Amino acid sequence: MAISLDKKKEIVKNLEGSLKNAQSIVFVHFKKLPMAATTELRKQLREQSVGYTVAKKTLMKRVLGSQGYAGEMPHLGGEVALAYGADLLAPAREVYNFQKTHKDGVEILGGVFEGKYMNGAEMLSIATIPPMDTLRGMFANVINSPLARFAIVLNEYAKTK
């Protein structure tokens, strides 16, 4: 269905406003995704302060081209949506989490991370980075591990004496 010129200008203006403050953007390919699953995806993204917009690819390319990102935009085939947010990792991580449960309907095609275009594989590696609280816990465990092992050795030595 054709969109009027005024409607296209409004869509471009809304996309520019949304993407202006976005730290990262994920290109999401969705196919044969039921409406209930789409609603669930939007709800999960909204809970993490991630925006989700579906628009014509030509309008998306126009807006992304005006943003001045480095590199080459990945090929966007099929139906494409944008997931974006102020958090660097949240858009990719949340789309990836949804993709694990809906393998047939959602796929990460690529995105923009720190001002550069990334392909799908690079965005998947970004999506698998754990949240900050988990990383802090892992770091504390790494620091605590030698001390815990030393305490176990001292305890075993004390049992022999």
Image (spheres, helix red, strand yellow):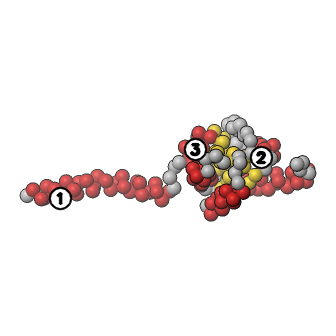
Report if the CB atoms under discs 2 and 3 are less than 8 Å apart.
Answer: no
The residue type indicated by label 3 comes to Leu
153 left or right, relative to 95: left
The residue type indicated by label 2 comes to Met
Rendered position, 89 above or below 46: above
Q: Which residue is mark 1?
A: 155
How far across and down, in percent of the image, does residue 107 sit?
Answer: 64, 45
How far across and down, in percent of the image, does residue 75 sit?
Answer: 71, 37
Q: Residue at x 74, y 45 (%)?
A: 79
Q: Residues within 10 Å of mark 2 (few under 14, many from 20)?
A: many
Q: Closer to the camera, 110 or 62?
A: 110
Q: Residues within 10 Å of mark 3 (few under 14, many from 20)?
A: many
Query: For residue 138, what is the image quadrant?
Result: bottom left
How far across and down, in percent of the image, does residue 128 sit?
Answer: 53, 48
Secondary element type, mark 2: helix
Q: In the rendered structure, which disc, 2 or 3, sits on the residue that comes first in sequence?
A: 2
Residue 42 visible in the shown view: no
Secondary element type, mark 3: helix
Image quarter where the C terminus lies is bottom left
Q: Residue at x 60, y 44 (%)?
A: 123
Q: Which residue is mark 2?
A: 60
Q: Which residue is mark 3?
A: 124
